[in-house]
Each structure stands twice: as structure tokens, then as C-alpha cells.
């Protein structure tokens, strides 16, 4: 009977319904309910990377960093370019001040979805923490453009950082230290193919 149900797609339907219920609970800030419903979706369809990534994100928002990390890892085992899992791993690494790991995950999140303002913002901030302000400035410009297009209130904060990066670049130039050039392969543009 279970095989017949799977062939009809009922397992997937039930899993997707739990996924939708989890997202609705998350929107209502009911994190415990969101985590439970996402667990139900995973139990029904344990091969969906996006389910693990979403539950990991819920755990991260709930302060359960270890559980979040485990779910992000599982999602990335299933699909290495799962955007939310890479973004979540990047956020954790950024919080731990592990700039190289953060950068690697934010780059992979960017490859998964190059039009997410949050990813662009974190890419900029990570480059800034590494002292690479020209790259930070370029990514923050892209974040501002996305935030502007989507009406995101984080645009004002991104614009402040953009001005700060510009100030730091100008200060570096004044001290006769030409800022490093942005290598084209390091700085994919929106709309370009992000495949390597």
C-alpha cells in the first residue's frame, strides 16, 4: 500500500502540505510548531534538501545552533548548492568570525540564487571583515539595488555601509595604498551565469 501511495504522489503531497504549514507557523513566529511540521515533512520525504534547510533555519532563529548546523549539513549532502543551507552555514560562520568559511558558504548561496539581497549583504560584510573593501562595496551596491527593487527596509542600513566602504577605500587611496582590484572571477554580476 505504501508503494501505491508513493506512486500516486500522496506522500509528496502530504510532505508539501506539512512544509506549507511549517512556513505559515514560521510567518506567525511560532517556531516550535514550524520545527515540528518541518520534521513531519522530512519524515514523509527525507530526500528534500529544502526541507532540512528550512528546519535548520528555524532552529537557527530559535537559537539552536547545533541542530541548525546538523540540518544544514544534511541539506548540503543532498544538494551542495542548496541556497538556504549555504546561507545558514554562512551566518553561523560569520557569527563565529570564521570569515573564510562564511565567504565560501555565502558564495555558494549566491550561486544558488544570485538575486537574494541578504546574501549580497552578507557577502559585502564578510569581505569588509576580511579588509577587502572594494569587493565589499561592489556587493553592497548590488544589495542596495535588490533591496530598493523589493522595497526592503534594510536598504537604509545597506546604504550606510556603502558610504562607509567608500570612505575606507578613499582613506586607503589617500594613504598611497591603492586598493586591490576586484578580480572579475571573484565578482560575478547579477544576471550573469554564476556557473564556473
Image: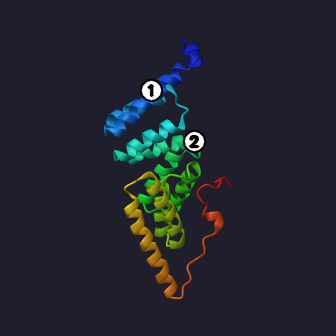
Q: Residue at x 45, y 40 (%)?
A: 54
Q: Residue at x 45, y 78 (%)?
A: 168
Q: CA distance from mark 1 to mark 2?
A: 24 Å
Task: Name the one closer to the observer, 149 or 96.
Answer: 149
Give the vertical position of 157 relative to 132 (above or below).
Answer: above
The location of residue 101, given as percent across then percent down, is: 52, 58
Give the vertical position of 1 relative to 87 (above or below).
Answer: above
Quarter of the rendering containing residue 3: top right
Residue on which disc 2 sits: 77
- Does residue 133 appear in this view? yes
The location of residue 175, given as percent across then percent down, is: 50, 88
- Does residue 39 appear in this view? no
Task: Name the one closer to the observer, 126 or 97.
Answer: 126
Looking at the image, is mark 1 or mark 2 earlier in the sequence?
Answer: 1
Q: Residue at x 61, y 60 (%)?
A: 188
Task: Name the one closer to the observer, 82 or 73.
Answer: 82
Instruction: Return the mark for residue 17.
Output: 1
The location of residue 117, given as percent across then percent down, is: 47, 55
Q: In the rendered view, does 120 fall on the left or right side of 35? A: right
Q: Residues within 10 Å of mark 1 (few under 14, many from 20)?
A: some
Give the vertical position of 7 relative to 48 (above or below).
Answer: above
The secondary structure type at the circle numbered 2 is: helix
The secondary structure type at the circle numbered 1 is: helix
The location of residue 149, given as percent across then percent down, is: 47, 54
Q: Residues within 10 Å of mark 2 (few under 14, many from 20)?
A: few
Amino acid at each position: 500500500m505504501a508503494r501505491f501511495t508513493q506512486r500516486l504522489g500522496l506522500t509528496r503531497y502530504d510532505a508539501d502540505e506539512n512544509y506549507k504549514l511549517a512556513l505559515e507557523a514560521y510567518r506567525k513566529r511560532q517556531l516550535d510548531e514550524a520545527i515540528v511540521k518541518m520534521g513531519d515533512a522530512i519524515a514523509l520525504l527525507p530526500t528534500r534538501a529544502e526541507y532540512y534547510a528550512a528546519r535548520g533555519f528555524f532552529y537557527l532563529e530559535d537559537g539552536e545552533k547545533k541542530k541548525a548546523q546538523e540540518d544544514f549539513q544534511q541539506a548540503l549532502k543532498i544538494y551542495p548548492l542548496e541556497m538556504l543551507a549555504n546561507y545558514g552555514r554562512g551566518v553561523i560562520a560569520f557569527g563565529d568570525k570564521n570569515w573564510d568559511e562564511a565567504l565560501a558558504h555565502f558564495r555558494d548561496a549566491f550561486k544558488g540564487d544570485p538575486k537574494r539581497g541578504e546574501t549580497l549583504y552578507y557577502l559585502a560584510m564578510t569581505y569588509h571583515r576580511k579588509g577587502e573593501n572594494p569587493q565589499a562595496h561592489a556587493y553592497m551596491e548590488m544589495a542596495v539595488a535588490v533591496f530598493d527593487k523589493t522595497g526592503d527596509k534594510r536598504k537604509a542600513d545597506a546604504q550606510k555601509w556603502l558610504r562607509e566602504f567608500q570612505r575606507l577605500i578613499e582613506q586607503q587611496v589617500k594613504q598611497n595604498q591603492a586598493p586591490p582590484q576586484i578580480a572579475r572571477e571573484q565578482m560575478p554580476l547579477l544576471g550573469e551565469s554564476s556557473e564556473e
